[in-house]
Amino acid sequence: MINVDKIREDFPILKRTVHGKPLVYFDNAATSQTPQAVIDTIVDYYSNYNSNIHRGVHTLSQEATDKYEEARIKVQKHFNAKEAYEIILTAGTTHSINIVAAGFTSLIKKGDEVIVSALEHHSNIVPWQMMCEKTGAILKVIPMFEDGSLDMDTYHALVNEKTKLVFCNHVSNALGTLNPIEEIIKKAHEFNAAVMVDGAQATPHIKPDVQALDADFYVASAHKLCGPTGVGLLYGKEEWLQKLPPYQGGGEMIATVSFKKTTYAGLPHKFEAGTPNICGGIAFGAGLDYMNAVGFDNIAKYEHELLTYGTAELLKIEGLKIYGTTTKKTAVISFNVGEIHPYDIGAILDKLGIAVRTGHHCAQPIMDFYQIPGTVRASFSFYNTKEEIDILVSGVKRAVRMLS
Ligand SMILES: *Cc1c(COP(=O)(O)O)cnc(C)c1O
């Protein structure tokens, strides 16, 4: 059970006002808010043991190294990776995807096929298009249906012996659709194709088990998990991380360097060139600790209540249309009202203290599918309340009255 009043006490930002109104924060799919425990972790790092890791003989460096490696183990346990060195700490989802896409550029040949879903964030489209341009690989797309779900029959028909890689999000950030990634992975593996799952939008709601899913790569960002910006993970199965070449050269990723030949460090350091976001990594661990203490079963149950309530209340508004209507979805409501531009609704809601996202949500192909410029997206978290949804609904009604 979620005690939402108690949880809200943990988030200082939820006490602030915007344009004189209490903040109603419904932009959780873009970034989550930060609990005091994570803020304290960041302050503690810079106040007490800020230091570079892995190379220092002195106490501060050792303390920072220990905490950083502890954070890696927290991430490993959270995602149930087999080994801690299968967790690469990166700058976030986009960075993680680019590491994998750049690595595959040297493993993929002309005429090989790679498959992407129609529901992807631009982060999970553009790096692969760049890879295809360089290699001559062919990009195929799993189409979507009107309700925002994937056309799995077509997916099954697309996979064949030429397929080398499939990349798909676990949950769509624009619509909230929960994709059948178990089925996607199983099918790809029948043809020995690797699968990279973009978990940026699933991880705030679901605790994924990368071994049970049998994902080859799984990526996510700390800032959607109550952690700081600029840090995330790339999970890769050991055999794949061994096969991929390093992404960047620099300090930390080498074993030995001479002008004749440099040899690379083992995992995970091979992919962690340069001084990482040390404080961010440690705070990433603190964010996971916080969410696990709340409990992902509790989070899923509570957010589902918010989704059901919010959907029913918003649909009472005349002319309001929700995009992404499959029953398998997380607490994201993407909508438009009549012909009103989503930006105009968003701007009025902001004046009322309500933070929503408007636009294409970095998923233009989805907007093209629906032939709309964008949507208003309200995305809920476990610290939101039904009262806040009521404020949103009356805010939308007011915006509609003003704009029509
Ligand atoms: C947020 C998001 C991304 C991008 O994450 P960054 O932290 O900006 O790198 C990619 N894919 C999905 C599904 C997302 O929700």
Image (cartoon, rainbow, N blue to C red):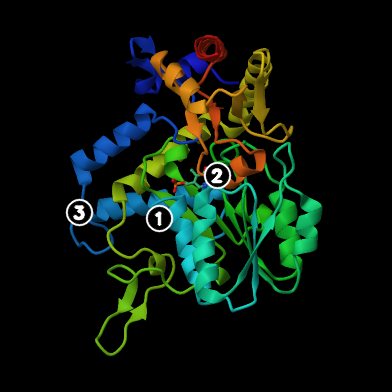
Q: Quadrant of residue 253?
A: bottom left
Q: Position of residue 28 (x, y in %)?
A: 48, 31
Report the residue at 52% width, 27% height from top.
Answer: 342
Is residue 171 among the parts visible in the rendering? no
187 and 339: which is toward the camera: 339
Residue pointed to by mark 3:
59
**Left of 206 or right of it: where is 284?**
left
Q: Which mark is drawn over residue 363?
A: 2
Report the residue at 72% width, 52% height from top.
Answer: 182
Report the residue at 81% width, 54% height from top.
Answer: 153
Q: Find out whether the residues at labels 1 and 3 contact each other: C-beta distance under 8 Å.
A: no
Q: Which mark is drawn over residue 256?
A: none
Q: Is residue 245 above or below residue 18?
A: below
Query: Which comes before the other along the chain, label 2 or label 1?
Result: 1
Q: Position of residue 325 (x, y in %)?
A: 71, 31
Kindly identify the amino acid type of the residue bearing the numbered disc 2: Ala
Kindly identify the amino acid type of the residue bearing the numbered disc 1: Thr
Report the residue at 54% width, 9% height from top.
Answer: 401
Question: In 3D space, how far apart are the residues under numbered discs 2 and 1 (Cα atoms)?
Answer: 23 Å
| Camera-nearest label, 2 or 3 | 2
Q: Is residue 40 above or below residue 255?
A: above
Residue pointed to by mark 1:
90
Query: Which comes before the other along the chain, label 1 or label 3?
Result: 3
Identify the element where label 1 is drawn.
strand
Query: Which comes before the other along the chain, label 2 or label 3?
Result: 3
Q: Position of residue 194 (x, y in %)?
A: 64, 66
